[in-house]
Image (spheres, rainbow, N blue to C red):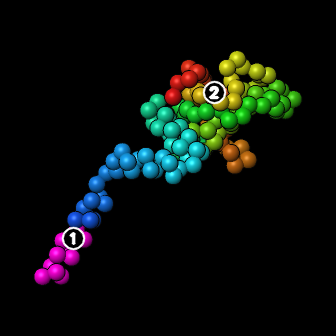
Amino acid sequence: MSSATHPSDGADRGDRADKPAGRFRRMLDRLSSSPEELHSAELQQDAEAAGCTRIGDCGDRQIVKVTGTLRTVTLRPRAGVPALEAELFDGTAALDVVWLGRRSIIGIEPGRKLIASGRISMSHGRRVLFNPKYELRPLGQE
């Protein structure tokens, strides 16, 4: 008789494991995740909510609209022309955003979120977006 109860007990446990994670499970996941993983997940959700393409999914010569956080901003001349370069990260991958002929742009600074659109090109194995249309996200917007 006890052997008949074991299969049903196992089935019950399997059913419980298939249920969606509750609040407690999500809290445990957050506590066990690194700050970088949490930030990446937040950026990916932000990109999806804004209707943007994930940078990790962007291919060469593709016209895209992407969003993320600027990690670095540097002035780096290209062929003798000033160029403002920034690294945009959306939680899936990074993208270099380059404004040719610019030494600075008000609001373009590390930590700032923005939406950029244009045609992706590949340069030395990295995705690059030259002179994109862009929109700065309001400060403090999550």
Secondary structure mostly seen in the magenta stretch:
helix
Residue tagged by mark 1?
Answer: 9
Nearer to the camera, 117 or 50: 50
Does the rendering let one see residue 38?
A: yes
Nearer to the camera, 77 or 75: 75
Seen from this angle, which residue lies furthest right? 80
Seen from this angle, which residue lies furthest front? 2
Callout 1 secondary element: helix
Does residue 18 appear to the left or right of 51 in the view shown?
A: left
Q: In the image, what residue occupies the spot 31% across and 60% down?
A: 17
Mark 2, Cα crowd under 10 Å, few <14 / some 14-19 / many 20+, is some
Instruction: Please give the range of residues in magenta.
Output: 1-11
Residue tagged by mark 2?
Answer: 112
Query: Cα distance, mark 1 to mark 2?
Result: 53 Å
Nearer to the camera, 44 or 66: 44
Q: In the image, what residue occupies the spot 68% across and 24% down?
A: 108
Amino acid marked by disc 2: Arg
Residue 6 belongs to magenta span: yes
**Labelled disc at residue 108:** none
Q: Is residue 78 above or below residue 14?
A: above
Q: Is residue 20 above or below residue 46?
A: below
Does residue 11 appear to the left or right of 116 in the view shown?
A: left
